[in-house]
Image (cartoon, rainbow, N blue to C red):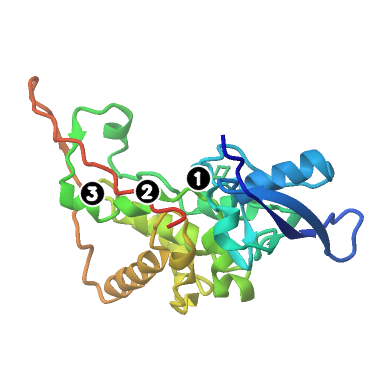
Amino acid sequence: MEQMKKVPITFYIRRFDPVTDEEPRIQKYVLQVEKGMTVLDCIHVIKEEQDPSLAFRFSCRMGVCGSCAMLINGKPTLACNTQTLDLTDSVLTVGALPNFNIIRDLVPDLVPMFGVHQRVQPYIIRKDTQEMEKPSGEYFQSPHQLEEFLQFTYCIKCGVCMAACPTMATDRQYPGPMALTQAYRYNTDSRDDGGGERKDLVAKSHGVFGCHYAGECSNACPKGVDPARAIQLLKRDLVRDYLHLGKDHACAKTHPLPPNAERKPKIEAPPFTAGT
Ligand code: FES
């Protein structure tokens, strides 16, 4: 069998331990890389064969969990979904995601991001609490109503959009594209009635109007989600609300299902877009 050709790639990896280091430093590693090796694979080999002290985060290795997001050649993306030899035949730079504090080396502190995510209440909120506790039927949703927010449900909370966002880089109080997109996703869900409760975070002085519509979040998203669009639509909804023009959907009511009701056909997911 023909031997796979190996290419020597020089990795410049940004190292930092906030406990012992005053400044980040760049460490050089040279690795023989063959076709098919992702950046995450390469970092694993470096750790196993050259430097066990290198810290990074990963889990699924298939672009699903969002754990391995890092800055690769200056671009925030998923390391497990990036083919090394597609990017370079000589040199690669790797660092932790910007706009986050660093726990160590390539591991960003995502706790503030998840804290803001929690504050937008990323779940269906309704006034009919009795019905929520003891459902008497289903909340019908048309395919069109589903399409209104479906793409925003593909967010894997990897933090790539937050690292790409120029507003995040200058305003740490800005909630960021991930949380704002999830606010829009639930506000737009025809079953939800919680827009008013999310307004505090979305409409505050460092809120949604801090976005200058650079669009970097949408360019960077490895799952093809368009946070920049969600944020502009959130702005539109706030203006509509300010002018008392009301919501563009009424909150869905419960419909008891007849015993042999025909279920709606399953809606197919769009094609996987990461790494394209
Ligand atoms: S390891 Fe899960 S997305 Fe990369």
Residue at 15 percent across and 46 percent down: it is 142
Quadrant occupied by the C terminus: bottom left
Disc sitting over residue 130 in the figure: none
Residue 129 coordinates in the image, percent (x, y): 32, 37
Q: Amino acid at mark 3?
A: Leu
Quadrant occupied by the N terminus: top right
Disc 2 secondary structure class:
loop
Q: Is residue 173 above or below residue 40?
A: below
Residue at 52 percent across and 62 percent down: it is 161
Residue 209 lies left or right of residue 246; in this view the side is right
Question: Does the CB distance between marks 2 and 3 fall below 8 Å?
Answer: no
Residue 110 coordinates in the image, percent (x, y): 64, 52
Between 157 and 24, the one lying in front of the other is: 24
Q: Amino acid at mark 2?
A: Phe
Question: Does the CB distance between marks 1 and 2 fall below 8 Å?
Answer: yes
Between 8 and 95, the one lying in front of the other is: 8
- Dot placed on the residue nearer the N-terminal end, 2 or 3: 3
Q: Is residue 54 above or below residue 170?
A: above
Between 2 and 236, the one lying in front of the other is: 2
Q: Quadrant of ligand 1?
A: top right
Residue 70 coordinates in the image, percent (x, y): 63, 56
User: Mark 3 Cα within 10 Å, few/some/many (few <14, many 20+)?
Assistant: some
Residue 104 visible within the image = no
Ligand 1 is within 8 Å of the C-beta of the residue at disc 2 = no
Q: Amino acid at mark 1?
A: Gly
| Tally of numbered tags | 3
Residue at 57 percent across and 39 percent down: it is 2
Disc sitting over residue 272 in the figure: 2
Residue of label 3: 146
Q: Is residue 218 above or below residue 52?
A: below
